[in-house]
Image (cartoon, helix red, strand yellow):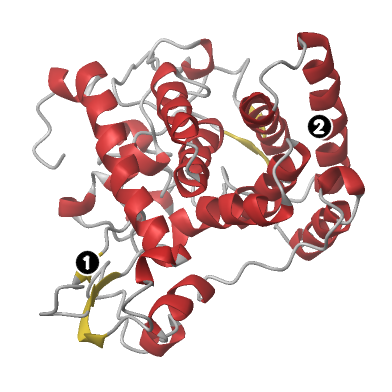
Amino acid sequence: MDIEFHYYITYLIAARAGFSTNDALVLAHSCQYTDDNNLVFSIDKGRPSEYHNYISQTMNITKPRHDLLRIYPLFHFIPGDPAAPTAMRKDGKLHRLNTTPDNTNANKIIDDAIKTRNLYRIGIACHSYADTFAHQNFVGYYDGYNSMKGMLEQRLPEVGHAEAMHKPDWPGLIWEDTRLVSSISRIANKDRFKRASGRIYQKLRFYNKPDISDQDIKSEIQFLLNDIEEAIGSPDYDNKLKPDRIKRYKELSLKQQYGGKLLDDFDEEIWLKDAVGNSISDFRFKMDELLSDIISFNEELNWKDKDHYKETHWYNFQEAVKAHQNNAWEILDKSVFSELELEKL
């Protein structure tokens, strides 16, 4: 999924589920920032307040680094049930790392995050959980299982959905996954996104109202999905209707049931800039994606406020990334990784 779901739709889900507009924004920003957190920084180097962050995405999945492959199954391709009905392939192949929607591992990860009541953790977990719907039938590792076998696709690395490019992530796209049996090979992303929305809403609504009845939550989910259905709108095969969809998401945010406050566009720089005074654009000119998929900045970056940096969104998001990684690794090591011998994980 891309910013449309991870930021705009996630905000609408959270606001409708009972979060304040401020809390819904932190949650949604964390959800999207999981995809934008791809730079390693050293802050206050040599001082007691020295800090190093973890990344939750690589600069470009079409140029992945072997030593960073852990990122994919932990944050974007959570392994599920290889024999799931949604994973039936023409060649009959199964894969222990295959991402399947709403899988047990993903549920455990997001449920654990919700128990912490940490908005940053919940937002990150919402990202990884939602991606099990969009990224289903791909594995977060180098493997021919991911291959789409087209001439163009053969030039791309067989990791995640690199060969499928943006097909799994665009809300309005209808496409064909030719690896799957014919009965399930036609993919309508809107249907997948709606299923993800309903399940995330259910979890977040129970967080805010544990005693809600099954009948009430079922009714609320249907109203939400009707709105999302209308906001995504008609099929869009080249993603040119994205600005129109975003306009509709923002219009929904003005409705009382979605917080009644206009949702601002996502700003990937604001949290870092508030913490250290530098914006991400200060470093973009140094990035050479042809040479490296990640750049570590060793400039003398410093906290703007050394006494209160632990109260900044950026710091708390980075701590949540580390906690998510540790928790997801523990869960997946028990259920999947310990049974395999993959040198890059």
Q: Give the residue at mark 2.
A: 225
Q: Earlier in the sequence, mark 2 or mark 1?
A: 1
Residue 80 in view, yes or no: yes
Helix, strand or loop under label 2? helix
Residue found at the very far front of the displayed protein: 307
Q: Count up the numbered dots.
A: 2
Q: Position of residue 226 (x, y in %)?
A: 87, 33
Q: Quadrant of residue 161?
A: top left
Q: Quadrant of residue 330?
A: top left
Residue at 43% across, 17% down = 104
Residue at 43% across, 74% down = 272
165 horizontally vs 188: left or right: left
Above or below, 168 against 312 in this view is above
Disc number lying in front (2 or 1): 1
Using a 10 Å C-alpha cutoff, classify the residue at mark 2 as few (fewer than 14 neighbours), some (14 to 19) or many (20 or more): some
114 horizontally vs 71: left or right: right
Q: Position of residue 208 (x, y in %)?
A: 67, 31
Residue 28 vs residue 338, the one in the foreground: 28
Mark 1: amino acid: His
25 horizontally vs 31: left or right: right
Above or below, 68 against 192 in this view is below
Helix, strand or loop under label 1? strand
Mark 2: amino acid: Leu
Residue 9 vs residue 220, the one in the foreground: 220
54 horizontally vs 13: left or right: left
Work out how far the residue at label 2 is from the one at label 1, CA to CA, in angstroms. Answer: 40 Å
Image quadrant where one finds the C terminus: top left
Q: Give the residue at mark 1.
A: 52
